Structures are given as C-alpha cells and as structure tokens.
C-alpha cells in the first residue's frame, strides 16, 4: 500500500472476495481502526463487491471490479466500480425493490455517506474518521501516561533498594 491511497483490481469471481477482506484488514492495521469501523467497512465493501459482481458485471469473468481507497483528514473513501451497464440509482433508491435493494440499504446504514457516479457503475462509500484519529490520539496518550507511570514506579523501587 502506498501513502493514503490504494487500488485493487479484481476479477468478476466470488473467489476474489478474500482480497477485499485482506484489503480491509490491512487498512485497519495501518490506520488503527477500532472494531466498529473495521466491521462497518468490511460489511460495506463486501456488499458493494457482491453487488458489482452480481448486478453490475453479471458474474462475467471477462469483466473487472476495481476498488479505490483514499484517506484525507476527515474521511476514508472507497470507490467500487464495475464494468456493467449501470443503472439509474435515483429511480432505484426511490422505488422499493425488496431483496435487490437490501445491499445498498445495508451499505448506507453502516457508512456515513454513499454516492453514485458513472451512470451507477461506481459507488463511493464514505466513513468519517476524524473521530478515529481523535480516539487514536487519546489512546496513545493514555498508553504513554501508563508507560511513564510504570517507569516512575520502577525508578522509585530502584532507589529504595
């Protein structure tokens, strides 16, 4: 992975799902994501991948699915793009399609913002991570304080002996 961006090109095959999972795990490790963010990102990306595979590319092995990741001060953004015909996402979102709509509703419920582009072939999934950075800073400061306290106690014990 390079910097605050990454890209993944996948075949239209359910066997590629493990690569999506590995991407999320690597990002969680790199950016110290808590379990909630990890789970939400995992759910959103696996749903988006499955939608691209099934509804976008219609399981056509000659087509690809790409996942692009970027991070700025406020959010992580994942763009999942297929090579299908696209769809009218506004009409789709304003109409009830029961099972066909469940994946997008799930993605919307676990993320902070969802956008469509390229005639519905691309979904951008946003996660507000400003609070993650704050909690990381707080946990690091707490850990630093605990280490400092332990070091002071050890020095005091050494002085007594």
Image: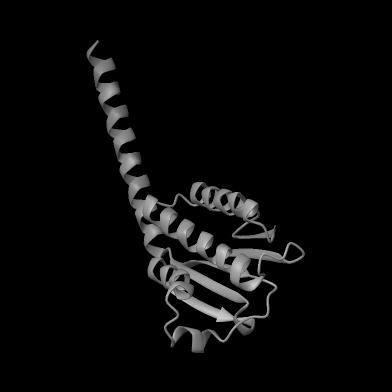
**In the image, residue 160 above or below residue 112:** above
Task: Name the one closer to the observer, 36 or 105.
Answer: 105
* Residue 29 drawn at (x, y percent): 50, 46
Residue 132 lies in quadrant: bottom left
Residue 122 lies in quadrant: bottom right
* Residue 124 drawn at (x, y percent): 54, 73
Q: Quadrant of the C terminus?
A: top left
Give the residue displayed 25% in from the left and 25% down from the top.
153
Tell whether 127 sits left or right of 67.
Answer: left
Q: Is residue 51 visible?
A: yes
* Residue 110 drawn at (x, y percent): 40, 65
Task: Name the one closer to the observer, 132 or 36.
Answer: 36
Give the residue displayed 45% in from the left and 49% down from the top.
32
Q: Residue furthest left?
A: 160
Give the residue displayed 43% in from the left and 71% down from the top.
102
Tell whether 2 sits left or right of 132.
Answer: right
* Residue 74 drawn at (x, y percent): 45, 68
């Amino acid at each position: 992975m390079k910097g605050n961006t990454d890209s993944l090109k996948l075949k239209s095959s359910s066997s590629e799902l493990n690569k999506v999972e590995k991407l999320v795990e690597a990002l969680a490790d790199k950016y110290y994501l808590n379990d909630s963010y990890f789970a939400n990102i995992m759910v959103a990306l696996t749903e988006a991948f499955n939608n691209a595979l099934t509804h976008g590319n219609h399981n056509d092995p000659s087509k690809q699915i790409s996942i692009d990741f970027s991070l700025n001060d406020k959010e992580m953004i994942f763009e999942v793009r297929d090579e299908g015909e696209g769809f009218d996402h506004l009409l789709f979102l304003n109409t009830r399609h029961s099972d066909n709509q469940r994946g997008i509703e799930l993605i919307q419920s676990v993320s902070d913002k969802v956008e469509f582009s390229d005639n519905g072939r691309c979904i951008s999934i946003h996660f507000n991570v400003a609070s993650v950075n704050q909690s990381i800073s707080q946990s690091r400061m707490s850990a630093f304080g605990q280490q400092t306290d332990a070091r002071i106690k050890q020095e005091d014990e050494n002085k007594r002996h």
